[in-house]
Image: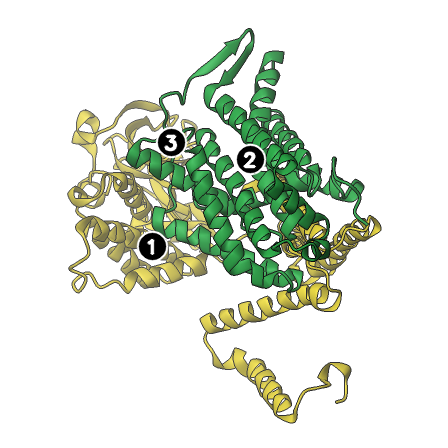
Amino acid sequence: VPFDVYLNVAVAGVLTGLVYGLMALGLSVIFGVVRVVNFAHGEMMSMAMYIAVVLFSTLHLDPLVMLVPIAAVMFVFGYALQAGLINPFITRPEHSQFLLVVALAIIIVNALLIIFGPDAQTVQTSYAYDSFAWGPLIVDATKLYAGAAAIVVAAGLFAFFRLSLIGKAIRACADNYTGALVVGLNVNRLYALTFGIGAACVGAAGTMMTLITDVTPALGPGYTLLAFVIVITGGLGSMPGALLGGVLIGLTEAMAGLLFTPSAKSMFSFAILVLVLLLRPQGLLGRRVA
Amino acid sequence: MNAAWLEGLSPRHMIFLGAALAALLIAPWLVNDYLLTVLIVILYFAYTGQAWNIMMGFAGQLSLGHAIYAGIGGYVAAILFTRYGVGPWLGFLVAIPVCAACGAVIGFLAFRFGVSGVYFAILTIAFAEFARIGFDHLDFVNASAGLFLPVKQYAHNDLWRLRALESIDFAAASALPAWLAGRVRLRLAEAQAWKAFDEARQGHDAAASRAESAAVRELALCDRGTLAPEDLDLYEESAVRVAASRWAAETPPKETGKRGVALTFTPRAPGETCVRAVEQTGARTGAAPRTLAERCTFGVVWRSALRWAPSGSAATLAVQPLPAWTELWTLRRGEDGGWSFDTLTAATTEPEVGYVESAGFSPDGNHLLVVREARVGGHVTRRFQVLASAGLSVEKWAGSADRLLAFKRWSSPAWRAATLALR
């Protein structure tokens, strides 16, 4: 295999990995602050993907244009979910929270199955087969747009958490739950806000993912696991870690698909997860939690 | 009765549990196979749940990858059985330590490095998914195709299939679309032809004859014009299967010899038949008849297929070693006056579905007319051939009997009336 094939596959893997990273960012934000393991993350992503597909097939709205509106819809969904359903479970043991979210995931998958059927659906944009060439490097236009949009959204999120007052308040909640209560923060509202932001991240990632891959209701569980692999690899609660983990996993899967067989690619992500969990449980960029 | 696990049970619970245990113990003698299967699955699930309970209920560790141990245990037992012939009752003695070792390694790694809570749950998923995808690509365990238990009781299966097909009432099922009725008739014909062979092998000639007549009838009732296009190959194949055992429905000829040479059929080992060409002249004098040639087989020897050339220098006989596979034995007198048996097969590759039958001889016995039909590469091919009796080499052949003058002139009326090759 000539070298430029490796180069092209690696670049495509990194760009897909950026979208993975954005999806995982949502999970990282939710777990880092709310401390609830969102086992419905991939299912929420397939929800966003179906919204993008329906908007495209009925109104011919480009997914890149609908990025912000769909993220907003998912924000509302996440906010309502946390405020209505998960907040009462915050003080319950971990496994009952877990069962609640898993039940939600099963409901989402089957609702999508009832509404849209099991067949794969796709978004056929006018630039679906365009590509850019720089010397030996050939990059799919859709992957480039999706990767760039993922970087922009992630940068916006970093800025929000670093610079805005609400972002600081959310980080305060994450650092010290009791302390946040003591200084008078409305923790339940901030939790709902955080879940909403996480859902918006995954909504944006899902919208871009429709440019790269087909959507079926069965995608959900796979993406949930993928998000966990990425977040734990990068470091739970670390936002740059999620992006780094996404790029690493995207690259690994692309190279594994090239060197071995595409159907075995997620085996290598799980191998990375096992190694990270055993050798560096806090993740690549995470801090050791006592 | 004060074992630790019975503590905290009220007498009423004890009575209920005892009754349930008694019911389960006598169930195998009372319920049918289906209910028994359901009960076994219920107990299996309860058992698997109990295995998980040890982790979560007793140790408080959320394991979401418990399926890995069930999977590894299943693979170990299946590989031992399919590859090494070790039955599951012994296999589980191997599977248990292997699974326990896997669990010990995963547990050691997890707890040695202090992985707990959600991380532990995700670690177990990671191991399980890693194993699942890995086994999906492992050629040693047949990758994604998986391992299947070999079926030993083919005859049992085919009888079961025949019974299911026979229960279809064509007259009542007028709602059955024609193409589907046709397909069912073809399957029925195949199953009956199989039964004819099976009965004949057991020496039940009358039953074999009935089954083969039914097979021919079903094939005749199937209207090829109404079949679905994808079933046309099936029609050809069914016809070959029926034709392979068609001799079951025919009556053996009275005379087994010609011009001083006769064929005798004698059993030897169980299931074995020896065909001998013997001299008839010596019989009257009381001396043992001289054997000119002999050949034995464990296949079904169809005596009804015995045909002598008018000249008496050659004969043909059908021998069926397998369901749907019939060969033609030829008995010929050579240049030196010695007699010998030879076998003509339907095809040299894929000996599964096919037959050869004799359509007649030239009056001088120098030429032999045969039909060969076989499924090769998924399609049935049919060849009408004129063979030289001397070397059994093909002199002329055609896909249709009309194209060969020899078939028009020499093929026997009995063959033309009964064969399925002119369908």
Side of B332 relative to A232 (left or right)? left
Whichever of callouts 3 and 2 sits on the residue coming sooner in the sequence is 3
Q: Position of residue A47 (x, y in %)?
A: 44, 45
Side of A195 relative to B94 (left or right)? left
Q: Which of the two marks, 3 or 2, is nearer to us in this view?
A: 3
Compared with B212, B330 (above or below) is: above
Pick the front one: A266 or B360: A266
Q: Label 3, on which residue?
A: A123
Q: To which chain does the residue with label 2 belong?
A: A
Looking at the rendered structure, whether the residues under marks 3 and 2 are on a common chain is answered as yes
Res. A61 visible in picture: yes
Res. B264 visible in picture: no
Rendered yellow, the chain in question is B
- In the picture as drawn, the residue positioned furthest to the front comes out as A184
Q: To which chain does the residue with label 3 belong?
A: A
- In the picture as drawn, the residue positioned furthest to the bottom comes out as B11
Name the amino acid type tagged 1: Ala
Q: To which chain does the residue with label 1 belong?
A: B
Disc 3 is placed on an element classified as loop
- In the picture as drawn, the residue positioned furthest to the right comes out as B112
Name the amino acid type tagged 2: Ser
